[in-house]
Structure formats: structure tokens, C-alpha cells
Image (tube, rainbow, N blue to C red):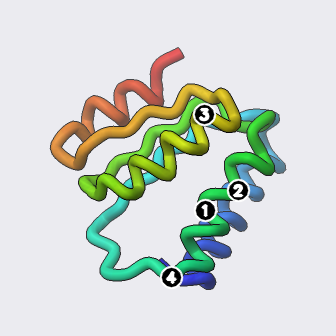
Amino acid sequence: MDYNAVNELKAAILKKFEEHDTINLYLEDNNIERFTLDAVFIAGIFPMQHANRLNKIAMVTNRKWIHAIANFNKALIGKDMRNFTVNKRLEAISWIASD
């Protein structure tokens, strides 16, 4: 995932904010081949910038370092963020859709 891909994701989320005061966010690493440092930085900062508009965040990936970044964000913003492995994708979808 590079800078442009992260900015496209940000734009899609910001568009949802135009329609809804708060959202649940489901993010899945679908075998992304590479991550650039600026993309990781932006993805790490974005939840902090918009913490008041995010209800729950589900992070689905088998990469432990992405789970570590998500755990760091969870500690900083205090939101209900949960990490799931890819084989628990359906559990993540069920959780993010629940109240």
C-alpha cells in the first residue's frame, strides 16, 4: 500500500463522514504486497485525527506488525479496536456489524 492508495482510502472514509456522524470501520489486508513508510504513517495517524467519529474498528490481517500498530492506536485513542486474523474474517464482520 502506497501513499496514493492510503489517500484513496482516506477520501472514501471522509466521504462516509459526510453522510454519517460516526462510523464503524472494517479494514482488511488483502495480501497487499508492500507498504511504504508514508502510507503506514498516514494510516497510523488517521484514526487519531478522527477518533471522535469512529465507533469501532476491525483490523483483519495475518501481519503481526499491523496488529501492533492497531494496538498502539487503540491505547492512544481509546476506541473499541479489535484485531482479527484472516481466518476469523467472518467473526470480524459479525462484530463490526453488531451494536
Q: Amino acid at mark 4?
A: Thr
Q: Amino acid at mark 2?
A: Phe
- Vertically, is 9 above or below 49? below
Which of the labelled discs sits on residue 75, or is there none?
3
**Quarter of the rendering containing residue 31:** bottom left
Q: Are marks 4 and 3 in contact (CB under 8 Å)?
A: no
Q: Residue at x 53, y 38 (%)?
A: 57
SS assignment at label 3: helix
Residue 76: x and y in percent read 67, 37
Q: Amino acid at mark 3?
A: Ala
Residue 4: x and y in percent read 61, 84
Q: Are marks 2 and 1 in contact (CB under 8 Å)?
A: yes
Q: Amino acid at mark 1?
A: Ala
Tag nearer the camera, 4 or 3: 3
Q: CA distance from mark 4 to mark 3?
A: 23 Å
- Number of residues whose C-alpha sits closer than 10 Å to that of mark 4, classed few (under 14), some (14–19) or many (20 or more): few
Residue designated by label 2:
46
Q: CA distance from mark 2 to mark 1?
A: 5 Å
Q: Along the polypeptide, which appears first: circle 3 or circle 2?
A: 2
Q: Residue at x 70, y 56 (%)?
A: 46
Q: Along the polypeptide, which appears first: circle 4 or circle 3?
A: 4
- Number of residues whose C-alpha sits closer than 10 Å to that of mark 3, classed few (under 14), some (14–19) or many (20 or more): few
Residue designated by label 4:
36
Tag nearer the camera, 3 or 1: 3
